[in-house]
Image (spheres, grey):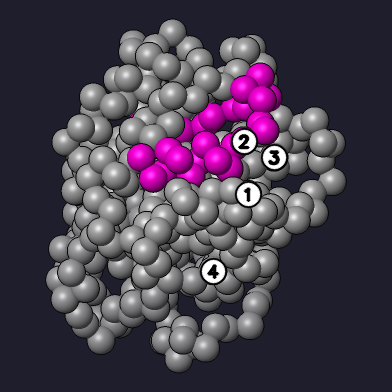
């Protein structure tokens, strides 16, 4: 993804001067009266391309989308805001704070930077979209025409979650006009806490991943890996069952396990190391079909713990769009959505996983049936449909 480069402005003594610095050249064809959507996110725009990026890039067709990230330390002695325009029309805002800025000063700096950037945006045209309740610490004073909480994960179950997160989520749910959830299980957990909750499981950009159905140039770091290849892409963190991966690799040294994605919140030294396990690091969204095209079977070896209890993995339909059979641990939303299909097999133990992979190899003998079955599973799925249905719910909530 191209980056137009950062603009910056400061707060405090140089405020009058900063108003000139923060002017950003907008290339959007939106009407000047288009509403502004402020998205407050714990995920970074240039990290893994997932639900927030899919949705916000579509909302940018009808809204001026501001994507406000968590702060990053700066070597400057004052707080400032990095502002960059993405090619899909989203403006990314990153607070840059000096090292000495801690505690309540962090919240105050973010609030001031945000307020200054929003100067001139009338509250009747502002929509605030929360991905994390922790953003309330600097945004709860805003009075938009609509407040949305897109609860894509149960963040309180993740390793290192702030102890105050649950209390802030309670406050956010009182404040929100409409709540979306990232899956049906999460919807079932939240629906009694608010009177306007709607499940929107992760969807898929079919055209993008369908490229993997045809031969594609092999990425250099995957080209030398022998077949058969069993692949996974996504964040490598506490949600993966590393013991399951290690045992499969031990039992089947002739199979090669390819893991594509950044390693987050776990010690890389804790990852199982074998000659048939290959960690290729994080890749751009545009590169994923190139890797997927070189796999025989796609894997979702998720651990069954609190952090995976409510997940609805985006990669399930993406793998299918790429024409790959899938083997997954029994994550609830995967079982209820895909467990009845003949292309997503569910397995819990190493022995079950190995048997399911062998059955998936047999599927590949009838390539046309695999592709036809995948098309049938995905026929009503797309991020465009999800976006339009969300817009309908937002209109009803205003």
Mark 3 touches mark 1? (CB < 8 Å): no
Q: Earlier in the sequence, mark 1 or mark 2?
A: 1
Membership of 288 in magenta stretch: no
Range shown magenta: 108-133
Query: Any mark on residue 119, and which?
Result: 2
Q: Earlier in the sequence, mark 4 or mark 2?
A: 2
Q: Nearer the viewer, residue 61 or 252?
A: 61
Quadrant of the image occupied by residue 72:
bottom left
Residue 308 percent across, percent down from the top left? 27, 43
Q: Earlier in the sequence, mark 3 or mark 4?
A: 3
Residue under numbered circle 4: 284
Residue 377 percent across, percent down from the top left? 58, 41
Residue at disc 1, secondary structure = helix
CA–CA distance in space, label 3 to label 2 = 14 Å
Membership of 119 in magenta stretch: yes
Are there few (<14), some (14-19), or many (20+) residues within 10 Å of tag 2? Answer: few
Query: Any mark on residue 19, and which?
Result: 1
Badge nearest the viewer, 3 or 2: 2
Whether residue 49 is visible to the viewer of this picture, yes or no, is no
Q: Residue at x 75, y 41 (%)?
A: 61
């Amino acid at each position: 993804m191209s980056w137009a480069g950062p603009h910056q402005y400061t707060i405090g003594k140089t405020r009058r001067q900063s108003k000139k610095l923060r002017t950003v050249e907008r290339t959007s064809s939106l009407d000047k009266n288009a509403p502004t959507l402020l998205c407050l996110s714990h995920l970074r725009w240039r990290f893994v391309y997932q639900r927030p990026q899919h949705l916000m890039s579509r909302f940018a067709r009808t809204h001026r989308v501001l994507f406000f990230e968590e702060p990053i330390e700066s070597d400057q002695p004052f707080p400032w805001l990095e502002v960059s325009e993405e090619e899909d029309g989203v403006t990314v805002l990153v607070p840059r704070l000096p090292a000495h800025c801690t505690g309540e000063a962090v919240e105050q700096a973010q609030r001031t930077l945000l307020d200054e950037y929003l100067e001139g945006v009338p509250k009747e045209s502002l929509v605030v979209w929360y991905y994390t309740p922790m953003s309330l610490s600097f945004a709860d004073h805003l009075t938009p025409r609509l407040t949305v909480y897109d609860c894509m994960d149960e963040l309180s179950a993740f390793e290192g979650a702030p102890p105050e997160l649950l209390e802030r989520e309670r406050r956010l749910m009182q404040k929100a006009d409409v709540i979306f959830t990232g899956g049906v299980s999460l919807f079932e957990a939240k629906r009694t806490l608010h009177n306007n909750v709607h499940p929107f499981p992760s969807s898929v950009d079919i055209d993008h991943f369908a490229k993997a159905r045809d031969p594609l140039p092999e990425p250099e770091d995957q080209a030398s890996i022998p077949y058969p290849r069993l692949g996974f892409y996504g964040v490598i963190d506490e949600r993966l069952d590393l013991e399951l991966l290690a045992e499969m690799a031990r039992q089947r040294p002739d199979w090669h396990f390819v893991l594509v994605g950044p390693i987050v919140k776990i010690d890389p030294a804790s990852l199982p190391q074998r000659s048939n396990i290959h960690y290729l690091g994080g890749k751009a969204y545009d590169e994923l079909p190139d890797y997927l095209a070189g796999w025989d079977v796609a894997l979702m070896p998720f651990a069954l713990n609190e952090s995976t209890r409510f997940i609805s993995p985006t990669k399930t339909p993406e793998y299918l769009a790429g024409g790959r059979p899938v083997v997954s641990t029994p994550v609830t939303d995967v079982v209820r959505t895909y467990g009845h299909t003949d292309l997503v097999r569910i397995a819990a133990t190493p022995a079950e996983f190995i048997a399911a992979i062998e059955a998936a190899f047999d599927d590949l003998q009838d390539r046309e049936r695999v592709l036809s079955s995948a098309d049938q599973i995905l026929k009503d799925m797309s991020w465009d449909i999800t976006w339009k249905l969300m817009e309908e719910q937002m209109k009803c909530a205003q």
